[in-house]
């Protein structure tokens, strides 16, 4: 049996922890009036050993309770009729009521044509159940199997927070036979394949069935992980030691540009802990991932400097990946970490026609409006709108030589073509980029003590409001502008940068009983369900995490 021939039962054997599967399916006793349809149903039941085209139930994957909806393609091509559709809806509704994640594994030709419009409308009912499940802050995962077409792909097969697909799977809306019947020629090769849809951003990753279980298990553990954040073992937090903040290194703006372009400079890959990260998308200049920071899972939206240095600059499609990550975080009430390291977006006719400016604006607006805690890390280069789109977070952290500028220093060209290490002064006809340590750059602020530990958070705490992101500056009594909204912090090494993020996520905890954002705009429904029955009590008024300077 090939992977394309995998039955629903064999997939359950691969995925579900042994001895934990509990079927939720009640017997189907519908007797079709049409003789031919009745005969087809009888043959399908005898051939597959199932009474309908989907199996639903509850089991553990990697120790995490999960609801599964699995298509049986051998039963009338996995088509969805009234009974099968109702079975899917009931399973998803039970998962929502129980606060459980859902993994859907469709393999279907779509609507069951023998039942006509009644079956067709089941796609709406299933989509509605998925929407309600996601609105409750619960995870919905999809694994597209061979084949997934028609109404199934156009409804519950395309609504996953994360979507994986089987290698070489046929995935598309228009079935090949339908296309050939309409146009008298075969559908073009290579279009409706899992691999092609992955390249176009419609599928996140292509995974063999045997690789699915560990990937799903790690994803579930990250998203459903309980408990508050904690500092890594052996780490020292000096954030409350009262030491005075110090200015960062005094190199020139061009020195910072050269340093951030060095071939051996750490980037997004090094910033993320491989063992504590699930990469959702990593095939472009913007990555989307789930990662653990000292016990707090965050959605990471990061710019990969190496892909950009190789010529793959940030395009409108990549910014849509970033916006999708923000939507994922809002759905699941997870904090967001953006990592900025870019020589600038793609400047081309294709980018203009693809809506580059619009995507920058929407990305920026989405980040500002997120109802979850956000932290941005200026890891290196920060040129143009591609950097700005990921910058306006609640808390902004920077490497001591990170820089931000409306354009690359060479002007409106790809700065990846610049030669690192070239000694050069800043052009006299162009304003230099704002480094974090400049008195005219209060949107970041002061540096910390040397790595690897965090010394102090040097910023004011301000009430989180709709004006917080618009009124970022005010003049101090000495005439210098200071930030009044988000916190500001710098770091000098990658290790201290990761530590800074860990500590900030602890301070920005979405846990309503442990973080200073208690009572803020966080989605309360999903969070309340996670803490239902908890013996924890709310902190007294004014409580802040230990060791912080607000």
Image (cartoon, rainbow, N blue to C red):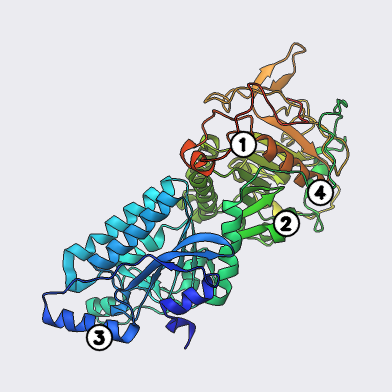
Q: CA distance from mark 4 to mark 3?
A: 61 Å
Q: Is residue 386 above or below residue 176?
A: above
The residue shown at (49%, 36%) is 524
Residue at image mark 3: 43
Q: Position of residue 309 (x, y in %)?
A: 70, 58
Mark 3 vs 2, N-terminal side: 3
Mark 3 or 1, nearer chain start: 3
Element type at marker 2?
A: loop
Residue 393: which disc?
1
Looking at the rendered structure, the secondary structure element under dot 3 is helix
Give the tally of numbered discs. 4
- Which callout, 3 or 2, points to the residue nearer the camera? 3
Q: Position of residue 492 (x, y in %)?
A: 83, 42
Query: How many residues crowd mark 2 within 10 Å: few (<14), some (14–19), many (20+)?
Result: some
The secondary structure type at the circle numbered 1 is: loop
Which of the pair 364/519 is nearer the observer? 519
Which residue is depicted at the point 33% across and 58% down?
90
Q: CA distance from mark 4 to mark 1?
A: 28 Å
Give the SS element for disc 4. loop
Q: Which residue is denoted by mark 2 in the rendering?
A: 273
Q: Which residue is mark 4?
A: 233
| Sequence order check, earlier mark of 4 and 3 | 3
């Amino acid at each position: 049996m090939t992977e394309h021939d995998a039955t629903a039962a064999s997939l359950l054997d691969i995925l579900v922890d042994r001895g934990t599967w509990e079927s939720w399916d009640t017997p189907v006793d519908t007797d079709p009036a049409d003789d031919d349809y009745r005969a087809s149903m009888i043959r399908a039941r005898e051939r597959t050993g199932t009474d309908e085209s989907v199996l639903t139930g509850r089991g553990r994957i990697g120790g995490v309770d999960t609801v599964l909806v699995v298509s049986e393609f051998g039963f009338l091509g996995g088509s969805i009729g009234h009974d099968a559709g109702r079975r899917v809806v009931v399973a998803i509704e039970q998962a929502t009521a129980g606060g459980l994640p859902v993994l859907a594994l469709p393999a279907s030709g779509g609507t069951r044509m023998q039942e006509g419009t009644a079956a067709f409308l089941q796609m709406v009912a299933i989509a509605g159940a998925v929407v309600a499940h996601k609105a409750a802050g619960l995870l919905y995962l999809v694994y597209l199997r061979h084949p997934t077409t028609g109404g199934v792909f156009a409804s519950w097969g395309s609504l996953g927070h994360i979507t994986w697909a089987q290698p070489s799977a046929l995935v598309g809306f228009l079935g090949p036979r339908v296309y050939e019947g309409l146009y008298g020629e075969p559908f073009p090769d290579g279009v409706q394949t899992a691999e092609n849809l992955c390249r176009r951003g419609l599928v996140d990753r292509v995974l063999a069935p045997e690789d699915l279980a560990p990937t799903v298990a790690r994803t579930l553990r990250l998203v459903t992980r309980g408990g508050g954040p904690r500092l890594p073992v052996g780490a020292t937090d000096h954030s409350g030691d009262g030491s005075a903040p110090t200015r960062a290194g005094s190199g020139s703006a061009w020195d910072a540009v050269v340093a951030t372009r060095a071939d051996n400079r750490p980037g997004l890959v090094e910033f993320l802990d491989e063992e504590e990260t699930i990469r959702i998308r990593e095939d472009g200049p913007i990555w989307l991932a789930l990662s653990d920071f000292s016990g707090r899972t965050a959605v990471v939206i990061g710019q990969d400097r190496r892909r950009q240095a190789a010529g793959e600059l940030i395009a409108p499609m990549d910014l849509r990946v970033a916006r999708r990550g923000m939507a994922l975080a809002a759905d699941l009430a997870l904090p967001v970490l953006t990592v900025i390291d870019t020589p600038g977006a793609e400047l081309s006719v294709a980018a203009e026609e693809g809506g580059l400016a619009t995507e920058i604006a929407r990305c920026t607006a989405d980040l500002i409006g997120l109802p979850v805690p956000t932290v941005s890390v200026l890891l290196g280069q920060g040129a143009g709108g591609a950097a700005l789109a990921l910058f306006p977070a609640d808390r902004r952290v920077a490497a001591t030589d990170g820089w931000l500028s409306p354009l690359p220093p060479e002007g409106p060209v790809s700065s990846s073509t610049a030669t690192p290490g070239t000694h050069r002064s800043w052009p006299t006809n162009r304003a230099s980029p704002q480094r974090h340590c400049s008195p005219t750059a209060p949107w970041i602020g002061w540096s910390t003590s040397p790595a690897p530990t965090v010394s102090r958070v040097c910023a004011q705490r301000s009430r989180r409001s709709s004006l917080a992101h618009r009124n970022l500056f005010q003049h101090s009594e000495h005439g210098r502008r200071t930030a009044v909204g988000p916190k500001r912090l710098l770091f000098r090494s990658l290790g201290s940068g990761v530590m800074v993020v860990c500590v900030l996520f602890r301070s920005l905890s979405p846990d309503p009983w442990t973080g200073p954002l208690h009572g803020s705009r966080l989605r309360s429904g999903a969070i309340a369900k996670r803490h239902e029955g908890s013996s924890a009590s709310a902190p007294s008024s004014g409580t802040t995490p230990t060791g912080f300077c607000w």
